[in-house]
Image (cartoon, rainbow, N blue to C red):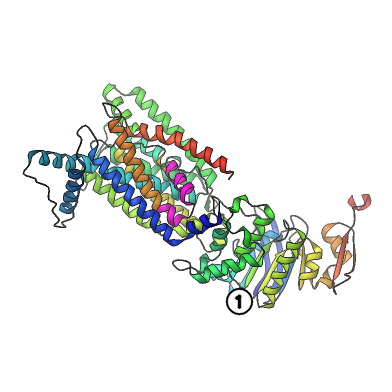
Amino acid sequence: MTKRWQEIRRHPATRLIVIAGLFVVLAVAVINSIQAGTVDVPADIAYKATLDASSDYLHLGYQSDLDYNNRDVRRLSALITTIRLPRVAMAVLVGIGLALSGSMLQGVLRNPLAEPSLIGVSSGAAVGAVSAITFDLSFTILGYDLGVAGFSFAGAIAGTLLVYRLAYYQRRTNPTTMLLVGVAFSAISAAYVGLMTFRAGQEKVGDIIFWSLGSLGAVKWEEVELTAAVILTGALFSLFMARPLNVMALGEVEAGYLGIDVQRLRLAAIILSALMTGIGVAYVGIIGFVGLVVPHFIRLLFGPDHRLLLPASMLGGAIFLLEADILARTIATTEVPLGVVTTLIGGPFFLFLIWLYQRRGV
Amino acid sequence: MLEATSLSYTINGKTIINDVSLSVERGEVFALVGPNGAGKSTLLRLFSGELTPSGGVITLNGQPLGEYSRRQLALKRAVMAQRESVSFDFSVYDVVMLGRHPHIKRAETPHDREVVETSLKSTESDYLADRFFATLSSGEQSRVTFSRILAQQTDLLLLDEPTSTLDLRHQQLIMMIAQSLASEGAAIIAIVHDLNLAAIYADRIGILRDGTWVDVGTPQAVLTEENLFAAFNLPTVVMPHPHYDRPLIVPLPLSKKQDS
């Protein structure tokens, strides 16, 4: 790597430019995603109707020049507000949550393999969701009907706490133990899901498979609101962790010498990841590889500094999930499950990244 | 500056440090020597506050170590551990900048960048600044880590074998930097395996064996054939150094008789 490039990479302005650039890409992806589907929406209607809907939602009093007396415009605008927008918003939020969790976990556990699904979140969520589906469990809190989603979220949190507890020994968590416990736990949960699928009747098998493969279809606004509250809060908190996460790169003991409370940082990152991934998985099911591929790709492009990595991962995750969802909707005549698309793209892409790393000799 | 009184450290029923006392003042380079497994690194980790002693007290500037917060300690003492592995592609410059962490409130200032550059220059490592830390040789990594310790700008430096992977020139360079920091008012405690390096640069030397002192004092007083045999179970010849008023140690091969 040349000296000039390193200097540019280091410059604080670079961070702003990269983040601004990713914002632009995200905006384009959002518009594309609103346009795409069984009904094609023209770009100008897509973005004007989105602005109107957003301004209406936030009471900004803005009104575009769209002619809502036109029947076609009214129909498309209704389609956008009730179906496309919640879906897009959910894709953005879940993408942020998964990719950000991956970055944080890799940094705090000092392991490039760390990923939300490897610390018990997804396994716990699967056990919760599948139990709820097979045994028809549900409960209601504050008017929210929390059936599958509620049990999935509870399972995600319980799974993470269990993995964390099992890896905790002599007042510290060993990252390697944590990942090993996570792998075992995910195998056990897969076996449980297998057993339940085997035992369940026709119609429930469909539900289980549909949930396990992940989908952004039929997302409701109230679900988006709840998810936004959790993930955006988590995202905000994570930004305070950027510098301590950089120090963690030196090693657990060294970070301690430099004033970092390693155990507390670890717990904070794990809890935030569990909450953000847990809520996402609860509503849209298992979405693989986002938490692994996005952070590694961002690191390869812009370096490992968490002050850039964390926000860039959020935006990158949102872009990745939006594009994957567009593909899921348009690649075939019927919708392909989103989790299948992300893994089919993310998996080979991850192999490509490994190949790139080897070439570079790092 | 650092005062330890009858320290002991026991873990899993095994006593690693047994009744060790030491007082190191500003302006002093103190070398810790001794055979493998003597407890040198454990002692250093006790001094750093990373480990809590099973018995005894350590005070830093008169205040017990346990009363400092992590960040306060990070501003008072820097620790160089034996080997450092940096995860991900952090550049050498980034790594040394991490040494500034306790000083930085929000973002690094031009002053921080100046300190990083000076620290890298002083260890003759500035030409490595844009390399990835992980791709350096172990000797280069050690110099960079030492630069990071310098960038932390503390009055107490705890160094675990800072010179063991370095070439001849850089061994001398690192010890010279330690000496000049001491002359500016810092206190240095360094684990050193090369007794001749310790003899020249240390103001005092402590020989540790089985978790207790064999002897503590000036190089001339401590580095004797008897002490060294007691510590290392190895015959040596100790003679006056041709250039300095310090001892020169020549290790001899083990004889069959002494080996048994």
Quadrant of res B154: bottom right
Residue range (magenta): A292-310
Query: Circle 1: is it few (<14), some (14-19), or many (20+) Cα within 10 Å?
Result: few
In the displayed structure image, the side of residue A101 where residue B158 appears, left or right: right
Residue at horizontal 73%, vertical 58%? B166
* Number of numbered discs visible in the structure rendering: 1
- The residue identified by callout 1 is B61
Residue A247 appears left or right of B205 = left
Q: Find the residue positioned furthest to the left.
A: A69
- Residue at figure coordinates x 30%, y 42% from the top left: A91
Q: Is residue A28 above or below residue B216?
A: above
Instruction: Answer whether residue A230 is visible to the viewer in this image.
Output: yes
Q: Residue at x 71, y 75 (%)?
A: B28
Q: Is residue A349 left or right of residue A2?
A: left
Q: Is residue A68 magenta?
A: no
Check the image and report above or below for A79 versus A239: above
**Image coordinates for residue A113, horizontal then vertical, percent:** 50, 42
> What residue is shown at x 60% (from left), y 76% (from top)?
B61
**The quadrant where residue A122 appears:** top left
Image: B105 above or below B12: below
Q: Position of residue A67 (x, y in %)?
A: 9, 46
Res B220 → quadrant: bottom right
Q: Position of residue B109 (x, y in %)?
A: 48, 69
The image position of residue A303, as x and y in percent, is 49, 52
Q: What SS does tag 1 mark?
A: loop
Check the image and report above or below for A39 versus A175. Answer: above
Per the picture, the main secondary structure of the magenta-coloured stretch is helix
Question: Numbered disc 1: what chain?
Answer: B
On whether residue A297 falls in the magenta region, the answer is yes
Q: Is residue A134 visible?
A: no
Report whether B149 appears left or right of A66: right
| Amino acid at the residue labelled 1 | Asn
